[in-house]
Image: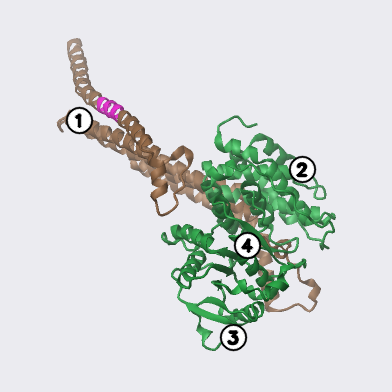
Chain colours: A green, B brown
Amino acid sequence: MASMPTNPATTAAETDPRLHTGLLVHLSTVSADFLEPTLENLAAAFSNQSVLVAIPELENLGSLKSFQNLRLLPYSPATTSTTSWVLTAADYFNTYKLAQENNASACLLLGTDSHTMAAESIRNLAYATLSGPTDLVVSRYHPGPREGLVNSAILYPVTRALFSARPRYPLAIDLGLSLRMTERMATLAQRYTAANQEDSLLWPISEAAAAGLSIAEAEVPKRDTPQPTPVDLNALLGQILSSFFSDIDSRAVFWQRMRSVLPAREIADAPLAVEHLDVSSMLDSFHLAYSNLHEIWALVLPPHTLLGLKRLSVVSRDSFRMADSLWARIVYDFVLAYRLRTINRSHLLGALTPLYLAWVASHLILIQSGVAAERHIEDVARAFEADKPYLVSRWRWPDRFNP
Amino acid sequence: MWQQVELALSQSAHRALVTLANFLPGVLALLLAILILTAIGALLAALLKRLLTALRFDDRLSRNSLVPLDWAPSNGPTLLVTRIVFWACVILGFLIGISAFDAAYAGNSQMSFFLLPYLTHSVGAILLLIAGTLLSRYLARTVLIEAVNARLQYARFLSVGVKWLVLVLTAATVLDHLEIGGMVVDLAFGILFGGIVLTLALAVGLGSRDIVSRSLEKNVDTEVPPTDPTSYKQPGASETLRHF
């Protein structure tokens, strides 16, 4: 992961009395093996300050060494989730319960492997949460050009375009939440936990944006991101995008009214060194899908987009480049088809996988040619913003002629 | 002799006309019952739709439900309720019509004996046909998408094979339900079904020969490490990518 400049507020935060004022740190997904290093990290982050740390009941709690500045709060979760690589409805629900019981004024929700974060990053997150009127602080990770690709291809550009929200990681696993934001998330989570859907994903950025709450980012230059246990990309993509598209659907009234376009990010043009990666398997997957799934794509995509894909299917490997506008149009049409149930939803999301792989191949070829990965992702995000009127128009009048 | 032929013909024509005269009221009663109940159903559905729209039924349902309900805009709860009411009336009309048809013969007619089971079985057969067609399309798409995402070159072939398996099974079930064909259908179905399965098995088996041999080689490599470490294959490109 690339190193980034740290928040200048960090040094001041070490002695900032606001940091320990009612802050609850919730390690909802910490494993027994990494509990001690995680607590050591927290102790270093909040040295000389007393912090309440909530951890689920684990077997090795008794054998832990003591940390003077950490007040441990073992608890039995009201609801449990089997997913640990990402925050789920159960995590938000439990956080609010704990915050309420302990009169916390703000919460830090740290995901799995938070021991790999620098203590400084945790402090930054806490500082941003407690200082000022911010309701949601989202971690800004700095993964390599080959990491977090679903986020770069779909989650970030769509969230930015629809909700006018800046955070680069809508599915961040380390969050800072004000009490009212925690309450909102818990209310939302309760709808799922009541239906025994504790593993459901929630989208805090869209929730905060729709409620008019303030959102900020905190730099987390270094962190190992946990990876999901099932490695089937198709199933995972289906699970995440299904939740994401449903969230978009449920907030249509809000994002159709949003007109503001965010200013472009400042990005260093010096690209990171990218070693050569063979993208031929991804291109093969796209070509195979083009010859087999064309009929299914034709139910979802308009003729102009299909023409773009046809052109893409005949270009050589070196000149393979999916235009940002084409990708934006594809994603928007899939969002629409998801809403209209044009075809079965699991089929729809399955048919998106080869197109996503084509985008990944195009992105990798581009960054290997010397373009900075972040620069390309910003261009993609701008293409999504520019094409938002298309989504709004088709959302309102789906039956209108669309060449 | 000519008189006898004439008598036989006139008696036969008389019998046929009597049978037709007995048959027509039953059919008319059946059609009338279906038509009237369909009209009532359409009227009820229209009234219900107006009422539910005025009560903002869709909004209330999604607001008060514990679980977030996601309905397609073209298939909202109101539309679902009205459709259920309409089709319930149509089915009711059909049932009334069948019983009227049955009553018209008073159980002493050969026509009633043969026609009634066919009429009732044909409803089941139509439902089976619709369900089979829908299932075949769903399964064919599922197999196609999964096979493409698994990068199987014969994805389309597999999908078409599955579609025809289900269609053949549906056709055989429908014919069996209508009691048409008897043993011939069973035999033809067995031959066709077995033929499709064998073709698919051969195609998949031959097509995935390379995959199986690679898998076996990999197992052998794991058991006995080769002396030259450079002979190992490089991991695939996707292994170095992190999508999440």
Q: In this view, does A371 lie to the left or right of A70?
A: right
Q: Mark 2 points at which residue?
A: A314
Q: Mark 4 points at which residue?
A: A132
Residue B88 disc label:
none
What residue type is disc 3 on? Gln
Q: Which of labels 3 and 1 is toward the front?
A: 3
Per the rendered image, the range of residues in magenta is B30-40
Q: What's the distance in space between the residues labelled 3 and 4, CA to CA? A: 28 Å
Q: Which residue is drawn at 17% across and 31% down?
A: B103
Residue A68 disc label:
3
Residue that lies at the very extreme toward the front in this rendered image: A17
Q: What's the distance in space between the residues labelled 3 and 2, CA to CA? A: 65 Å
Q: Which of labels 1 and 2 is toward the front?
A: 2
Q: Mark 1 points at which residue?
A: B100
Q: Which of marks 3 and 2 is nearer the N terminus?
A: 3
Q: Is residue A367 left or right of residue A260?
A: right
Q: What's the distance in space between the residues labelled 4 and 1, CA to CA? A: 79 Å
What residue type is disc 4 on? Gly
Disc 4 chain ID = A
Asked whether residue A75 is drawn in magenta, I would say no
Quadrant containing the C terminus of chain B in the rendered view:
bottom right
Asked whether residue B34 is drawn in magenta, I would say yes
- The part of the image, by quadrant, that contains residue B213 is bottom right
